[in-house]
Image (cartoon, rainbow, N blue to C red):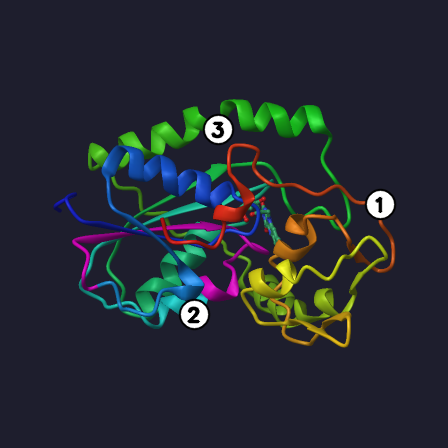
């Protein structure tokens, strides 16, 4: 497998995956593209590296969607990052990829700070500890790719039922978001929402029924004005080594 022309395709709402994508590019070169905006089938690359968070023991909707668009010839490496427990998300990804005829040669998982903070926020010291050791874990995955030590997750239990059930309920999260009085109607949330679920009309921010639960709006609102269930008591998170304005861009 040539490593001359890598297509690094990422999805990220709080920067962890983008941080990993940038580290991959530092070592392997290549072009970084944001999955929701990427419309090709990957055939312009010698190989594809997908960098994605784990969502509910599975994958975010834009990542699931792109699996139906990519071609089955270009070799693909997947790096999943997660906040607490993968729940077999690597195996689930592999099985979905096989069903779609994709050429996955390796799947790796690595821990990053948790961003699902709507119910519980991990303590700051723990988040900092995970961040401090992240480069080591990312480096180990990149070394494995360079050395062609490809990892395919063995047959193990996945949580597909939980994943599909949660995915069907993600729209409810958006329905429980609102913008409080700190909102200055800058429209940043409208612009960054990968599902086109947020609108600004008549001086009011509204959330529709298409939320995919990425929490990008909640974490990246410049005024921290988006709140969940009318309560403003949860911590926001953006990877401190990433400029929030880069998330969602091709680099
Ligand atoms: C809707 C949602 C579901 C998540 N589900 C899981 C999960 O099942 N297991 C886990 O360990 N982390 C889970 N996470 C945490 C993210 O995978 C983790 O924080 C990731 O690093 C975020 O990447 P990003 O900063 O690139 O968006 C979830 C996050 C969200 C928003």
Residue name at image x 79 percent, y 45 percent: 234
Q: Classify residue 99 as left or right of residue 125.
A: left
Vertical position of residue 247 compared to residue 185: above or below = above
Mark earlier in primary sequence (3, 1): 3
Question: Where residue 65 is drawn, which disc sits there?
Answer: 2
Q: Is mark 3 within 8 Å of ligand 1?
A: no
The question of residue 217 being in magenta is answered with no
- Neighbor class of circle 3 (other Cα within 10 Å; few <14, some 14-19, many 20+) is some
| Label 3 – label 1 distance at C-alpha | 27 Å
Q: Position of residue 9 (x, y in %)?
A: 35, 54
Q: Which residues are magenta?
A: 43-63
For marks 3 and 1, give the one nearer the viewer. Answer: 1
| Residue 232 seen from this side | yes
Disc 2 crowd rating (10 Å Cα; few below 14, some 14-19, many 20+) is few
The residue identified by callout 3 is: 134
Q: Is residue 45 magenta?
A: yes
Mark 2 and mark 1 in contact (Cβ < 8 Å)? no
Q: Which mark is residue 147?
A: none
Specify whether residue 156 is in view: no
Q: Nearer the viewer, mark 1 or mark 2?
A: 1
Q: Secondary structure at mark 1?
A: loop
Position of residue 149 relative to residue 210, above or below, is: above
Q: Which residue is mark 1?
A: 233
């Amino acid at each position: 497998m040539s490593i001359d022309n890598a297509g690094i395709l990422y999805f990220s709402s709080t920067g962890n995956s983008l941080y990993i994508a940038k580290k991959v590019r530092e070592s392997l070169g290549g072009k970084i593209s944001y999955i929701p905006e990427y419309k090709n089938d990957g055939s312009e690359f010698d190989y594809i590296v997908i960098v994605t968070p784990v969502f509910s023991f599975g994958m975010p909707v834009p990542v699931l969607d792109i699996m139906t668009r990519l071609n089955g010839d270009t070799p693909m490496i997947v790096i999943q990052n997660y906040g607490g427990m993968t729940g077999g998300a690597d195996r689930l990804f592999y099985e979905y990829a096989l069903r779609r005829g994709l050429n996955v040669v390796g799947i790796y998982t690595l821990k990053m700070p948790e961003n699902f903070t709507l119910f519980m926020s991990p303590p700051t010291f723990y988040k900092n500890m995970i961040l401090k050791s992240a480069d080591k874990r990312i480096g180990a995955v990149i070394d494995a790719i360079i050395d062609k030590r490809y990892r395919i997750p063995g047959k193990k239990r996945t949580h597909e039922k939980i994943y599909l059930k949660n995915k069907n309920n993600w729209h409810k999260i958006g329905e429980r978001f609102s913008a409080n009085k700190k909102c200055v109607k800058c429209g940043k949330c409208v612009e960054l929402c990968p599902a086109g679920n947020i609108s600004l009309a008549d001086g009011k921010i509204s959330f529709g029924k298409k939320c995919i639960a990425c929490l990008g709006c909640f974490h990246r609102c410049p005024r921290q004005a988006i709140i969940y269930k009318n309560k403003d008591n949860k911590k926001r998170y953006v990877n401190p080594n990433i400029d929030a304005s880069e998330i969602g861009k091709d680099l």
